[in-house]
Amino acid sequence: MSPLTVGFAGLGRMGTPMAARIAGHGFPLAVWNRTPRDTGQLAGRGARLAGTLRDLASGSNVIITMVSDGAAALSVWAEPGGLLEACTPGTIGIDMSTTGPHAAREIAARAALAGVRFLDAPVSGSVALAEQGTLTTMVGGEPTVLARAMPVLQAITGKQLHLGPQGAGAAMKLAVNIMIATVNQAVAEGLALAAEAGIDPRDAYDAFLVSAVSSPFLRYKRDAYLSPGNGPVSFTTALMAKDLQLALDIAEVAELPFRLTAAAKESLDRASAAGFGDADFACLARLLRPGSAPA
Ligand SMILES: NC(=O)c1ccc[n+]([C@@H]2O[C@H](COP(=O)([O-])OP(=O)(O)OC[C@H]3O[C@@H](n4cnc5c(N)ncnc54)[C@H](OP(=O)(O)O)[C@@H]3O)[C@@H](O)[C@H]2O)c1
């Protein structure tokens, strides 16, 4: 069996550390981003900068994309000049972006026409976990394809969950994110209630962390909630709102009354309208503080 050679498209907040881990594990790696970025750190690990998607695809038998949303993923894979035009049949294509199941299945169908074996494999966890290689990936697609791609996925992620056929990973990711977004709303409201009672936010947050609601998410988001707006942006308000809209679209068709998801989406939209679309989604904690602008 030929060795795995990897092409990676999308060097944003998540894509850059994920690509760095692939290079760090010794896989031959080519990287591409739509707009020029400083790729010095990746080059230092041996990655080759591809000038075009065609260039990225040539010589790669595993291609990973990590871009903003379904429209971006479709364009990178399926538009003229996109990856599918240049992939050798038999190539494994893995989209790790959060796109929702409809886009994932559409890319999968187009990939099949090009002879590309496609997995949707979005991730749970944020930038710090991407740097550590401890993300969880939720995978839809053929188990044999997943098995072949596994060494690369293990370089990026700590857990790999096979959820079913193509689209299943993308759907599961939305299920996780609607829970995170509603927890985000709940944390902001909990902190606001504690502040209203005169409790120091740090004491309130530390009480959350030893209470029954404690979770890995609450633990790694502590700084983001206690100093919203001051720390690095891990996941933007706009991207989280995108995920909730994908979930609400599914709920509407299935006639599922997703009230919590709708409420969380409304708060995120208000935050975006107030100029916080590019801020970390934990900014809700700032906007709900007593005396702050209403969110
Ligand atoms: N951040 C998180 O904590 C987190 C966690 C789990 C999953 N996710 C998901 O992971 C994906 C990436 O998130 P991120 O935080 O890394 O986003 P990001 O920092 O905003 O990066 C987005 C990337 O997508 C590229 N892109 C956007 N539109 C494109 C297009 N039309 N064609 C080609 N490339 C395009 C951008 O390229 P340019 O540089 O040219 O704009 C950039 O490389 C999203 O689907 C997000 O929902 C994020």
Image (cartoon, helix red, strand yellow):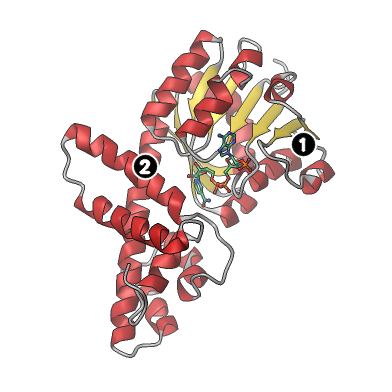
Q: Position of residue 13 (x, y in %)?
A: 61, 50
Q: Earlier in the sequence, mark 1 or mark 2?
A: 1
Q: Position of residue 284 (x, y in %)?
A: 39, 66
Quadrant of the image containing the C terminus: bottom left
Q: Is residue 236 above or below residue 15?
A: below
How far apart marks 1 and 2 lie (CA) works out to 32 Å
- Direction from residue 149 to residue 276 in the image, left or right: left
The local secondary structure at tag 2 comes to helix
Amino acid type at mark 1: Gly
Q: 168 or 285: which is nearer to us?
A: 285
The local secondary structure at tag 1 comes to loop
Residue beneath label 2, please?
174
Q: 34 or 275: which is nearer to us?
A: 275
Front tag of 1 and 2: 2
Quadrant of the image containing the N terminus: top right
Residue beneath label 1, please?
26
Q: Position of residue 112 (x, y in %)?
A: 50, 12
* Residue 82 in view, yes or no: yes
